[in-house]
Amino acid sequence: MIKPVKHNEPLVTHIYTADPSAHVFEGKLYIYPSHDLDHEQISNDNGDQYDMEDYHVLSMEDENSPCIDHGEALHLRDIPWVKQQLWAPDVAYKNNTYYLFFPARDHDYIFRIGVATSSTPVGPFIPQPSYIPGSFSIDPAVFVEGDRAYMYFGGLWGGQLEKWQTGEFVTDAVELAPDAPALGPRVAELSDDMLRFKETPHEISIVDPSGRPLLAGDEDRRYFEGPWMHKYNGKYYLSYSTGTTHKLVYAIGDNPYGPFTFQGTILTPVIGWTTHHSIVNFQDKWYLFYHDSSLSSGADNKRCVKFTELKYNADGTIQTIDPYR
Ligand code: FUB
């Protein structure tokens, strides 16, 4: 018998999972994770150890239910433009269709973002023949507000965001000086059919409480990867991973494009190098979905998705979570 899931414990243990994007569809919680493979890899800064080949969809009836694995929803072999590395996905619902957005390296080893569609939340998802024109880098997160949908994306290092500073892919892009403004994630509104960008992606500005842009050397606060957008009490919350300092942090803005003012830490560092999350409102509670590497005793490329409740203070700030307390 499959056991109910507990807070801060792996949702599933029969496969490795990471990068959870959680949504409420058809009255249930659906979780769209990366599917880490159980193979030995040497970790490097290029992220070659994250060599994933397919996606599985998970679901939970409620917070006390078992987590169900609905099996393979999309495989690399079925996506013509993809060479390797299916990284962190997200799913959005619009036009009576479920859209799975995913980053992967194309045949030139450049990360692009693709889309696949299904009539059900569990797939199978049918990929478009090519990636979204003008897309680049990793970690798409799609925020739907009314008729509009916005994609947030971008990741440093293996995610190649540094290489797109000029708007073109530059293989040997120079590193940013620590006192230069940090690179921000990108945002673009999606077309009504959700298959294209409606506009050239904008770089998001994340500023400190006095309005100054965060600097590249400010590794405790600057953007690294894994953006997520949610709305709470009329404000837009942009949350993300700080990568090298292994935190999940957030910033608040007045509209989907920002600027966003840095606020603080949502999740303290977890076991394993990466940290990646989503935030969802379900049955009158807010939840944080995240991953760590506890299931593999610390292997960076063998992670497991977990969840816990997320709470706000009266002023709208988020209470910091230590997942091991
Ligand atoms: O899972 C591969 C990559 O690791 C993701 O795209 C990043 O966010 C990090 O979690």
Image (cartoon, grey):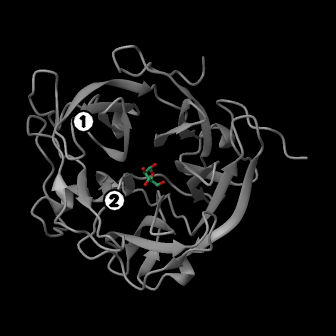
Q: Residue furthest front?
A: 146
Q: Residue at x 26, y 77 (%)?
A: 133
Please tell me how crowded label 2 is: few (under 14), some (14-19), or many (20+) other residues with Cα within 10 Å.
few
Disc ID at residue 147: 2
Q: Residue at x 25, y 69 (%)?
A: 197
Comparing 279 with 246, the one in front is 279
In terms of image quadrants, where is residue 78?
bottom right
Q: Amino acid at mark 1?
A: Arg
Is residue 274 visible to the viewer in this orientation of the structure? no
- The spot of residue 274 in percent (x, y) is 46, 42
Q: Residue furthest top?
A: 314
Q: Is 239 left, or right, of 185 in this rendering?
A: right
Q: Residue at x 30, y 56 (%)?
A: 150
Residue hosting label 1: 222
Above/below status of 161 relative to 176: below
SS at circle 1: loop
Q: Amino acid at mark 2?
A: Asp
SS at circle 2: loop
Q: Does ligand 1 reach within 8 Å of label 2's beta carbon?
A: no
Q: How many marks overall? A: 2
- The spot of residue 259 in percent (x, y) is 16, 38
Label 1, label 2: how many angstroms apart (C-alpha)? 31 Å
Comparing 312 with 273, the one in front is 312
- The spot of residue 266 in percent (x, y) is 42, 27
Comparing 140 with 232, the one in front is 232
Q: Residue at x 71, y 62 (%)?
A: 70
Q: Is 265 left, or right, of 208 in this rendering?
A: right
In terms of image quadrants, where is residue 282?
top right
Above/below status of 207 relative to 107: above
Is residue 108 visible to the viewer in this orientation of the structure? yes
